[in-house]
Image (spheres, coloured by chain):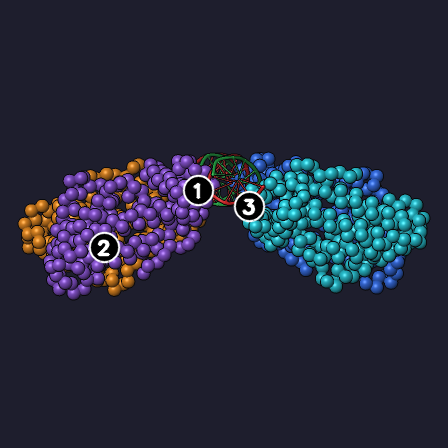
Chain colours: A purple, B orange, C blue, D cyan, E green, F red
Amino acid sequence: MTTSAPSSLKPRKKPQQARASATLDAIFEATIQLLVKDGYPLLTTTRVAERAGVSVGTMYQCFPHKQSLIYAVNERYLEILAEKIEYTCRAALGLPAAAMAEALIDTYWAAKTERPDVTRALYRSVVEMDNEALIAEFAARTEAATTAMFASASNRSFSDVESVNRALVTVIFGTVRNSFERSHSEQEVNDLRRQLIAMCRAYLESCVG
Amino acid sequence: MTTSAPSSLKPRKKPQQARASATLDAIFEATIQLLVKDGYPLLTTTRVAERAGVSVGTMYQCFPHKQSLIYAVNERYLEILAEKIEYTCRAALGLPAAAMAEALIDTYWAAKTERPDVTRALYRSVVEMDNEALIAEFAARTEAATTAMFASASNRSFSDVESVNRALVTVIFGTVRNSFERSHSEQEVNDLRRQLIAMCRAYLESCVG
Amino acid sequence: MTTSAPSSLKPRKKPQQARASATLDAIFEATIQLLVKDGYPLLTTTRVAERAGVSVGTMYQCFPHKQSLIYAVNERYLEILAEKIEYTCRAALGLPAAAMAEALIDTYWAAKTERPDVTRALYRSVVEMDNEALIAEFAARTEAATTAMFASASNRSFSDVESVNRALVTVIFGTVRNSFERSHSEQEVNDLRRQLIAMCRAYLESCVG
Amino acid sequence: MTTSAPSSLKPRKKPQQARASATLDAIFEATIQLLVKDGYPLLTTTRVAERAGVSVGTMYQCFPHKQSLIYAVNERYLEILAEKIEYTCRAALGLPAAAMAEALIDTYWAAKTERPDVTRALYRSVVEMDNEALIAEFAARTEAATTAMFASASNRSFSDVESVNRALVTVIFGTVRNSFERSHSEQEVNDLRRQLIAMCRAYLESCVG
DNA sequence: GATGAATGAGTGTTCATTCAT
DNA sequence: AATGAATGAACACTCATTCAT
């Protein structure tokens, strides 16, 4: 299940030196800014390099194609997101199941809402990229963490933890994404979040093991 | 809430004549086929015209830009989807709420699964297109239908039908989309569908008005 | 022996229409002029198109790559050269062998000297191009014509016409090319031509069949 | 006639030190290997340096441009070739003229055939380089040696040694080159060599002084 | 109306060359 | 002296769009 990225999409240079790492950061930030400002179709390698303050040549030293740049930006984004989820899951070990679901919802929603334009821009940057592997790896990491969490629930044991877990994760992540695509008011979003929590709680209560 | 499409994205020619309509159909079909076969980045106007059996010139009569073509294809897709949902909602009027949710889930899932490659291809075709308006219009139509449905539920009355409805719709649509992005096995997908139904039922039972 | 050109190097558009043919001519002429003026390394597709008075796009309509352009220019050059040789060979049928050799030398030398800068430029344009096929085809056509010619010599029959023919052709063509690379004075060139004729005559007299 | 190379194409550093000379050799060898393996268009300064085991910087110490590298490689190749010819000419002093011609043919042909891929690769490397001077210098050295040789012929004295010599040299060198461009079988090549020797002998016999 | 040849701005990418370390 | 990361001008090539026929 842990598919690793196609090597052709990997950045060439690992951030071994401080300088190179700073360069990578600048390139990532430039990419995201341009994605947010103008959208994917106007994202050219030249403009990214310009805004990052490096030459195109240097950029191609780090990323052998435009694709690999996009890939790396998404990879880093998902890496950070996965870390947040793992952290939340560890922190919630042993709590009642409903509290776990609520923690997961809060974390995911907060992460996505922190820079909503970035979230949206990255959702849209995916066209040219083979993102199957990326998604699969993120899913694998995430499900490992959430499964461990729900398995440790204090108040109940599930007959089929994997099934319940998969349902919760898919529902939560999917709901957040969908809520992002619709232009809800802030109040509507908050209400939606409450309803989602309620729904998960009801669901968990309904499946006593 | 009923935002209509930006006029620049609308096809120039409405399908008033049989001939024109056949042309439009051919163009739509060609677009979808190419999208499925080669993906958005390889979709060129020339290739679409070729495969549709019309000249580029003719295609530009119908769609003033490439964008408007993509827009129209998505619009038509959502139009059909909305009709299916409206039909389901009308048919479920007066049933118990849980049956309504189940019917909605079945319809939506079936529609998306019917031609899964098309579903995926269209999800990915959205880059160049300002899809806010499209989504908003679809959401408006859908919510009108589902709200009317849930308001007619035989077994209970909701304190806040709009809130419950928004939650259900967002959760269901979001879950389906997310399940589409993950590479679940057929068995996992079926199980997920059952869990989603269970979740909605538990939720509906928990919010007795 | 008659190897035909790799299809990837062939021009896309056959000169079926008067317009297209004029375009092709303009492109060919532009290519040759730039080759003569600035040499291969400065020959860019943009400059060729500019000088030919067409857009790059149109040029790429005719020639799918830069390579195919260079290939076509050389092909056309060799085509004309081959025709001249064939004409000379036909005209010399039945003459004494020495007269044939002289006619061949005169024709080849004149053809190459007509536009010496073009000759030199094309010799140098060959780097990026797989010219094996081109040379082979030219050689095959040429040898067919010269073999037929020498076989009809009035004064003698060769024990091995093919061998004698190959020797004469290789020597003559090679000598001309080599004389082109050295910076001989006009007088030296004329003398060289006389000596070459003398050499061929002496050779032919020495191999009485 | 003794034109020396344009100073801009000369290598910067003369092989004064053992170390530098080893570096030069490595660079030359790397260049030739890459030329043979991938052809001129894929020959980049970086790859040459890599394969030679030196840094680009060091390579640019030795050769101020890519051109000068190519120039130097060809220069060295012609230097060795010229030495072989000079050696042969000295060894043949006083022999009959026909034997001289045969010795010259043997030497030249052997030198070119020793590493035929190198021969071909260098022929094709000449595009970017102003090779007039190189050829001229080689021609001057060569003609001095051959003229001295033919002037010492035991059996006859030529009315115009320079003219005869120029003819022989141009014919022999040109024939070998041309035979290299055509795809002759080994048997055909051998026969061609015999015919060329016969031709030179017949020619020499015909021009008794 | 319909056609499709022509356009040319704009793209990703390379690679000879430099220069701070 | 030696290095090799950084540079950026230059290139081959594409493709949305137009418009003469």
Secondary structure under badge 2?
helix
The residue wearing badge 1 is A59
Q: Is residue A103 visible?
A: yes
The residue wearing badge 2 is A170
Side of C78 where B109 appears, left or right: left
The quarter of the rendered structure image containing the C terminus of chain C is bottom right
The residue wearing badge 3 is D55
Mark 1: few, some, or many residues within 10 Å (few <14, many ≥20)? Answer: many
Side of A103 where C132 appears, left or right: right
* Quadrant housing residue D191: bottom right
Measure how far apart labels 3 and 1 are at the Cα level: 21 Å
Measure how far apart labels 1 and 2 are at the Cα level: 36 Å
Q: Same chain for the residues at labels 2 and 3, yes or no?
A: no
**Percent from the top left, x then y, of residue B21?**
34, 47
Side of D14 where C146 appears, left or right: right
Who's the residue at 90% across and 50% down the image? D152
Q: Amino acid at mark 1?
A: Met
Q: How many marks?
A: 3
The quarter of the rendered structure image containing the N terminus of chain C is bottom right
Who's the residue at 28% across and 62% down the image? B185
Measure how far apart labels 2 and 3 are at the Cα level: 53 Å
Which chain is indicated by disc 1? A
